[in-house]
Amino acid sequence: MAVLELLKGDITCLEVDAIVNAANSTLLGGGGVDGAIHRAAGPELLAACQKIVERRKNHPAGACPTGEAVITGPGQLPCKKVIHTVGPIWHGGTQSEPNLLASCYRNSLILAQEAGLESIAFPNISTGVYGYPKAAAAEIAIKTVKTSLSKTPGIKQVIFVCYDQENYGIYKRLAGLW
């Protein structure tokens, strides 16, 4: 059974098998955690993402549709892989946002399992500029990871990484769900 952990800090500094990037559908960097990961990883990460974009240029939903995930090398990051997932933009919960957010966590764990990775670190997906309510997002993250681990037995460690104190406090309060 995997160990679930909580950390307040910078996801780009973690020496784990995979960190998850809360990407946008272009995969070409952006703000928040996406921008921080791209800056820390250097140009190699952008080049790897551009290859995915090129391979999927005719895909009707773009390089990485909301709820899906893709995997690249880490560039200059200390992890082994970066899993990019696109969280939903919050529209009041009326456009399948909870299901799409759960898919981000589930698909990231599946990709990590398929790549033979054992440890994975998640940021707070969709809670920044995408506006997802932080407490609701944290509940979905924890519950989805817990239920998905039975289908991804190779995952031994999951770290929820909170950059800000508000998200960290929410996860600490929800730790009883672990």
Image (cartoon, grey):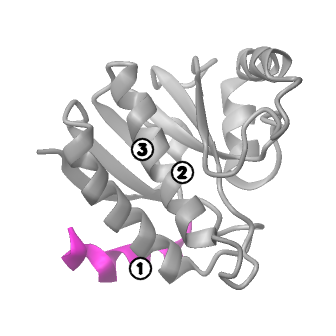
Q: Give the crowd class for mark 1: few <14, some 14-19, many >=20 residues within 10 Å.
A: some
Q: Is residue 129 depicted above or below 61 in this figure?
A: below
User: The magenta stretch spans which residues?
Assistant: 164-178
Q: Residue at x 31, y 34 (%)?
A: 119
Q: Give the crowd class for mark 2: few <14, some 14-19, many >=20 residues within 10 Å.
A: many
Indicate the secondary structure of the residue bearing disc 1: helix
Q: Disc 2 residue type?
A: Cys
Q: Earlier in the sequence, mark 3 or mark 1?
A: 3
Q: Residue at x 39, y 40 (%)?
A: 109
Question: Residue 16: in sight, yes or no?
Answer: no
Disc 3/disc 2 C-alpha distance (Å)? 13 Å
- Quadrant location, the C terminus: bottom left
Indicate the secondary structure of the residue bearing disc 2: helix
**Viewer-proximal residue among 161 and 100:** 100
Q: Earlier in the sequence, mark 1 or mark 2?
A: 2
Q: Earlier in the sequence, mark 3 or mark 2?
A: 2
Q: Disc 1 residue type?
A: Gly
